[in-house]
Amino acid sequence: MLDRLVGYEISPILWAKIKPALSAGRVQSVAVRLIVEREEEIHNFKSQSFFRVTATFINTEKRKLVAELSRRFDTAEEARQFLESITKSTFKITKVETKPARRSPAPPFTTSTLQQEASRKLGFSVARTMQIAQQLYESGYITYMRTDSTNLSQVALDMAKAQISKTFGDNYVKTRHYHTKIKGAQEAHEAIRPTDLQTTDITADSAGRRLYELIWKRTIASQMADAELEKTTVEIAISDSKEMFCCTGEQVLFEGFLKVYFESTDDEEETSPNHKLPHVTVDSPLTLEIAEATQHFTQHPPRYTEASLVKKLEDLGIGRPSTYAPTISTILKREYVSKEDRAPHDVEITTLTMIPGKDITETQKVEHLGAEKGKLLPTDIGTIVNQFLMEHFNEIMDYNFTAKVEKDFDDIANGTQAWRDVIDQFYVPFHRNVKQTENRSKRTSGERLLGQDPKTGKNVYAKIGRYGTLIQIGETNTDEKPLFASMKKGQSIETITLEEALDLFSLPRTIGTSEGEEVVVSIGRFGPYVRFEGKFYSLSKNDDPYTITLERALEIIETKRKQAQEKEKMKELYPHEIGEYEGEMVVSNNGKYGPYLTYKNTNYRLPKNEKIDPLTMKLADAVAIIRQTDEKKSRKKKKA
């Protein structure tokens, strides 16, 4: 009820003040806020470069040891000075610390952790994960997939113990009872797990089998022994410097649960730990083979993926297991947010190399940095809606308020609060604010002044229009009508330049002549097109009307002409009479979806998997297709 009050009362205000077909919601609007604020952080981020020094040493046993300097340098000159200072230095190990370590498995899957791991490991969207999980649940392969509990039933614990003992041995078994730590968790169902842990292979499509395998491994791993590790830290002193080199290694002594599964992170998938250092002792000398100072750049905060957005909402206590997938689907469908890839940008990296006894060399190479895949970015409309809601409905947009509401729901469910009181406390001030916003707030379009048009001297604006983002030249409150042009995909109100905006008014554009006629490119009601000799030829999705060449335009025209000629030929050949059957003519035709037969005013499709020429096919073959189709229809009627 509360969510409907929020959505039904705010959405009409968005229609009136921004544009039609918008919506607001208690959870969805907060999710958009997270993405918009992250984009603002990225926009304001200033990347800085620094130099990291690594060195390769050789010990007395001729084994190599790679270590990193504990200090980083701001400039190439500082890094060069350091490398010069150690050209004649001696090095020795001053500290070798070996510690035992243990790593415990992750708990069984909840809805959100399944969505996150399926995104990282399998590349599934949140919605697809839930769709596949629903199919597995309905087929009886897994328990209920909407849960925030990590608890396993005693039946599941017994099955896991038996399966692990049988497959790996008793020393791999460690029964664990998990309890959900998430604030406000309802725990109405146990964790997501296979219904039968002895079933390792299921009858499903590839995606279903992969998701089931992930659930099976996570469940089994959660009841397996800890991995036993040995972590080694080595410190290397420099004879004439206070700085020191350090390196760490990790060796697996007992695999435990790592034999089956290890959890991924949002940044990248972890690899199983097993980086062993060569045997070294304190005070043993090392010979420097090579030292390098490589330039690096600080990176902006990562944009949200579907998985990391779910994790953030869960950490804030916002939403329920059942709401994560529909929330993300809604903000994508409403085009408040887009899911995009970002191509890497080229950066020149400087590397200083020092080999003892030789001069320091400096090299530059271009590296591709900043590539992003499947990240959530706010659209212009999402940013403007967020600004409007933050200004007029800041309580609804507050993270703490949204989380508190979830707690109130739990209190109502537990009988400690009356639902009418909770709704009343929220609705009275909220409804008052709705009425005030309706009356006092101005219509907003996110308008941004880009500058003046050099030809006319009129102001150029980027803004939201009724049908999307556009550029406007001139004012709306004057007798002279302004000019409008739609912005291209990928252009944004916040980032578009005056030059880019004015380019949008370059259509229609004459790109040359052919056969004494002008070839003109423009955008019409049905998209971009080429106009030639009074006829219109649509451009493909990959053709940009602002940059298309004359050669490419003529190629499109020629292709379309040939297609038109083929259609005319077809009209002459069809309908084609094949022969008479039971007093009626069987005719072959060629329509929009390919060739077909017509008999007694009924159409019959030709089999797609067989190469049949409708102009040369025999009457017997046509009759066979008609009979088979009629028999299928008859069977369907009987079933019904």
Image (spheres, helix red, strand yellow):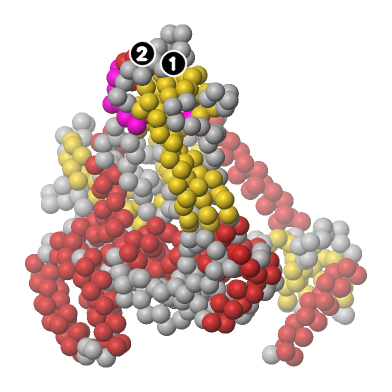
| Magenta stretch contains residue 331 | no
Q: Which of 623 and 313 is in front in this view?
A: 313
Circle on res. 268:
none
Taking depth in this image into account, of 634 and 140 the one nearest to the observer is 140
**From the viewer's perspective, is 168 left or right of 597?**
left
Residue at 86% in and 73% down: 623
Q: Where is residue 561 in the image (x, y as percent from the top left)?
A: 62, 43
Instruction: Please indicate, yes or no, whether residue 529 appears anywhere in the rendered image.
Output: no
- Residue 491: x and y in percent read 34, 44
List x then y, in percent, for residue 617.
86, 62
Q: Give the range drawn in magenta.
A: 66-78
Which image quadrant: the N terminus?
Answer: bottom left
Q: Is the magenta stretch mostly helix, strand or loop?
A: strand
Q: Name the residue under label 1.
A: 354
Residue at 53%, 25% in the rendered image: 59
Residue visible at 21% across and 68% down?
400
Q: Count of labels shown?
A: 2
Residue 179: quadrant of the picture: bottom left
Identify the image quadrant of the C terminus.
bottom right
One can see residue 184 in this view: yes
* Amino acid at dot 2: Glu
Q: Which amino acid does label 1 sit on?
A: Met
| Chain-order first, disc 1 or disc 2 | 2
Q: Do the residues labelled 1 and 2 touch (CB within 8 Å)?
A: yes
Tell me the tag on residue 84: 2
